[in-house]
Image (tube, helix red, strand yellow):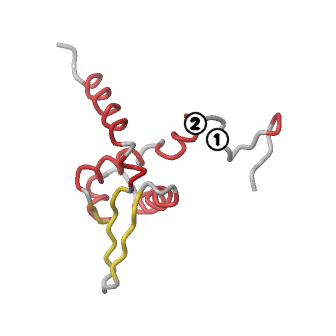
Amino acid sequence: MAKKIYRNTFLDEPSCPVDYAFRRIGGKYKGRILWYLHLHSVMRNGELKKALSDITPKMLTQTLRELEEDNLVHRKVYPVVPPKVEYSLTEDSEELIPFINYLREWGAKRLKPDS
């Protein structure tokens, strides 16, 4: 249940479209996961863990679940032993790639040492 705050607004409801978008892709890992899936098309959990060396297994699982719930990541489970699960982008997340790329380029410019 959402917690009530001032003027009949709720903590769990986005206050504007920008808030909505950043709730879906904000944070330390979501944008990076979407970018790696864009680069590789399909990745398994272990491949994502290697790509995001600073993420814990628990946080990776939680972040992938959130992205799946928001229809930004597709999770395909194969009925084999041991279990095989692959992650890929959805059509919704493909729309975000140009914006993530712009942010990547912006960050790359600012990471360059002054010449």
Q: Marks 1 and 2: in contact by CB < 8 Å?
A: yes
The secondary structure type at the circle numbered 1 is loop
Q: Residues within 10 Å of mark 1 (few under 14, many from 20)?
A: some
Q: Foreground: 115 or 9? A: 9
What's the mark number on residue 107? Answer: none
Of labels 2 and 1, the one closer to you = 2
Left or right, residue 51 beside residue 13: left
Picture layout, residue 111 above or below residue 77: above
Locate residue 109, reporting x and y percent: 26, 23
Q: Residue 89's quadrant in the figure? A: bottom left
Q: Residue 13's quadrant in the figure? A: top right
Q: Foreground: 51 or 26? A: 26
Q: Is the C terminus in the top left, top right, bottom left or bottom right quadrant?
A: top left
Q: Which residue is mark 1?
A: 14
- Count up the numbered dots: 2
Left or right, residue 22 beside residue 99: right
Locate residue 74, reporting x and y percent: 39, 63
Locate residue 105, reporting x and y percent: 28, 29
The secondary structure type at the circle numbered 2 is helix
Q: Residue furthest right?
A: 7
Locate residue 77, reporting x and y percent: 37, 75
Residue shown at 30% from the left, 36% from the top: 101
Q: Which residue is mark 2?
A: 17
Picture layout, residue 115 above or below residue 73: above
Distance (Cα) linking label 2 and label 1: 7 Å
- The amino acid type found where label 1 is placed reads Pro
Q: Is the N terminus in the top left, top right, bottom left or bottom right quadrant?
A: bottom right
- The amino acid type found where label 2 is placed reads Pro
Picture layout, residue 3 above or below residue 109: below
